[in-house]
Amino acid sequence: MTRTKSEPSETTKLPDFDKFWDYNQSEKTETQFRSLLETARESADRSYLAQLLTQIARTQGLQRKFDEAHRTLDEVEKMLDEGLRTAKVRYLLERGRAFNSSKHPDKARPLFLEAWELAQAAGEDSHAVDAAHMMGIIEAPGPALEWNERAIAFAERSDNARARGWLGSLYNNVGWIYHGKSEYGKALELFEKALELRQEKKQEPQLRIAKWCVARTLRSLGRVEEALGRQRELLAALEAIGEEDGFVFEELGECLLLLGKAEQSRPYFAQAHRALAADPWLAESEPERIARLKDLSSSLVT
């Protein structure tokens, strides 16, 4: 599969805004995208402008500003015609993501399905994989596994670098599906494949996430001492660059608790609670998890 040029474009004369993405700093990314808007509006490249606006909408969705995201996408929708196939695929993806993130997966599903079909027809391999990956997120475990495996097969066959760039995330997603089914050995195989890919490409912070997933699965396999050692390595690496990760703190606490070291676990649970309770998405979607962290660290909370 190769990408075919589906519409006239002057994107070679304009900045590749996709390179500005920082998914951990959506507000900053939105600011950078908006700095390109005036130039985009002045250009004759309607596809570029429409695609840029879809990504602004995505940053708004990540900030949970769903009404703003939909208004931005309304502007894109008015621009679309038969010639702007790539822009339409990206519009469908972002409209679907906005619906899914605001807890309307039934509205998102037909949009992702249409994006999957249209992206393949347009030769947009990367966006096709993205659509299949989103179907893997919104579906129940059985169909989700099928969609993720479909996305992996599609990406592995593609000679498009961006499409193949999805493989690390896809291996990770399928790993978590198997983990959720308590098939920890299979999950570990997939997390190790993702880790190998991240190491090969020297991708940070994805590499740290891949290492965390491997360590987390080792705990599920009962290899708690090994898991603890790997989480401690991650903690040391984070401290060396002046960063922290609430999920690493949480796992350190869980491993120590399993090893009968409750007193040593409490400081880590306290740090995990402080960090993870500040995450709006996690606080909303997993309140029991946040409450448990607080309970486990209660002796340190004032």
Image (cartoon, rainbow, N blue to C red):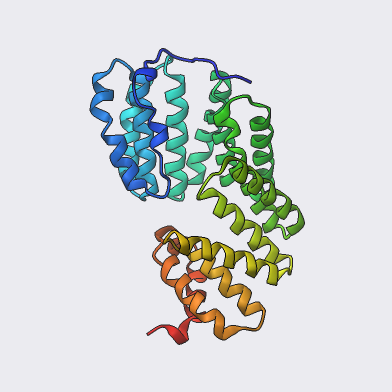
Residue 96 at what x, y percent from top left?
Answer: 46, 38
Residue for point 66% across, 46% down: 196
Indicate the quadrant containing the C terminus: top left, top right, bottom left or bottom right.
Answer: bottom left
Viewer-nearest residue: 74 or 186: 186
Residue for point 31% across, 35% down: 33
In this view, 24 is above or below 119: below
Residue 67 at what x, y percent from top left?
Answer: 32, 44
Residue 30 at what x, y percent from top left?
Answer: 32, 41
Indicate the quadrant containing the N terminus: top left, top right, bottom left or bottom right.
Answer: top right
One can see residue 195 in this view: yes
Q: Which of the 4 image quarters holds residue 230?
A: bottom right
For residue 154, side relative to residue 279 (left or right): right
For residue 115, side relative to residue 200 (left or right): left
Residue 78 at what x, y percent from top left?
Answer: 32, 24
Q: Residue reaching furthest top? A: 8
Q: Which of the 4 image quarters holds residue 150?
A: top right
For residue 75, side relative to residue 272 (left or right): left
One can see residue 116 in this view: no
Q: Which of the 4 image quarters holds residue 117?
A: top right
In this view, 238 is above or below 302: above
In this view, 287 is above or below 86: below
Residue for point 25% across, 24% down: 39
Viewer-nearest residue: 47 or 284: 47
Q: Residue reaching furthest front? A: 240
Viewer-nearest residue: 161 or 112: 161
Total tally of numbered discs in the picture: 0
In this view, 20 is above or below 259: above
